[in-house]
Image: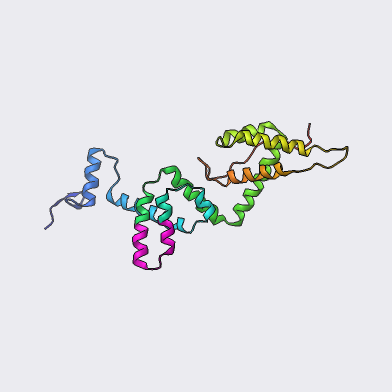
Amino acid sequence: MKKGYFVRGEFVAQGSERDEELKRELKGSESPSRTELKLQSAALQDLGEQLIKLRQDLRDALHLPDALLDALDQAQKLDNFEARRRQMQFIGKLMRKLDPHTLAHARQALDMQAMGPAADTLLLHQAEQWRERMIDNDESLAQWIDQFPGTDIQHLRTLLRQARKDAMPGKPGAASRHGRSYREIFQLIRDTLSQPAPNSAALPEPVYQTQRGAS
């Protein structure tokens, strides 16, 4: 007969997971149980398996460790069930080394991919909005700098100055012109917005809505 004890009518075998959980409760420990650790490990392994199918540009934006990237690439090439199973276990171990922010970014990238064309359309729309508003006023530029401090601000300011200069009509009644800087601003904004947001699952929406030519 197994050694153990009863708790509220439940028999708890010594050395079992339930026994360990009860001991942790008595000691006030917050350490996860073996069952919880197994569930966490399975969830990370599942996330790793989803990353195998992640679009290359979204995967590159995550800046994953080289070891994990290599493991994901190898998994794509495996057809043998047992070999792939072992590879996924290895990927799960590597996933446990990632920090919470990177894991959150990975889930966000998967969500963006799942949205498909809708996400791409939203991204283009937001990039256009940011470009027009930053060209129109410096308040929107300040907001962008606040949300994306990693931007090369000096380069962006140079592009904006040139875009404003290009937009000035040469003759009365002439239409505004859009030069190379106008396109480069859009590319810079789109590339930045396509990166996983540091603390949010949603792309930021600019709030300033100044109309071109408004006083």
Residue 52 vs residue 183, the one in the foreground = 183
In which image quadrant can residue 117 be found? bottom right
In which image quadrant can residue 133 be found? top right
Residue 59 vs residue 162, the one in the foreground = 162
In which image quadrant can residue 143 be found? top right
Q: How many labels were placed on the picture?
A: 0
Percent of width and height locating residue 23: 21, 43
Which color mode does the image show? rainbow
Q: Is residue 140 above or below residue 63?
A: above
**Residue extending farthest bottom:** 80
Residue 149 vs residue 13, the one in the foreground = 149
In this rendering, position of residue 169 left or right of residue 75? right
> Residue at the spot x=35%, y=62% of the render?
85
Q: Quadrant of the N terminus?
A: bottom left
Res. 209 in view = no
Q: Quadrant of the C terminus?
A: top right
**Residue extending farthest left:** 1
In this rendering, position of residue 168 left or right of residue 54? right
Q: Residue 116: within the magenta?
A: no
> Residue at the spot x=44%, y=47% of the render?
103
Percent of width and height locating residue 2: 13, 56
The overriding secondary structure of the stretch rendered in magenta is helix
> Residue at the spot x=36%, y=59% of the render?
87
Percent of width and height locating residue 154: 62, 33
Residues in magenta? 71-89
Percent of width and height locating residue 193: 59, 44
Res. 118 in view = yes
In this rendering, position of residue 26 left or right of residue 63? left
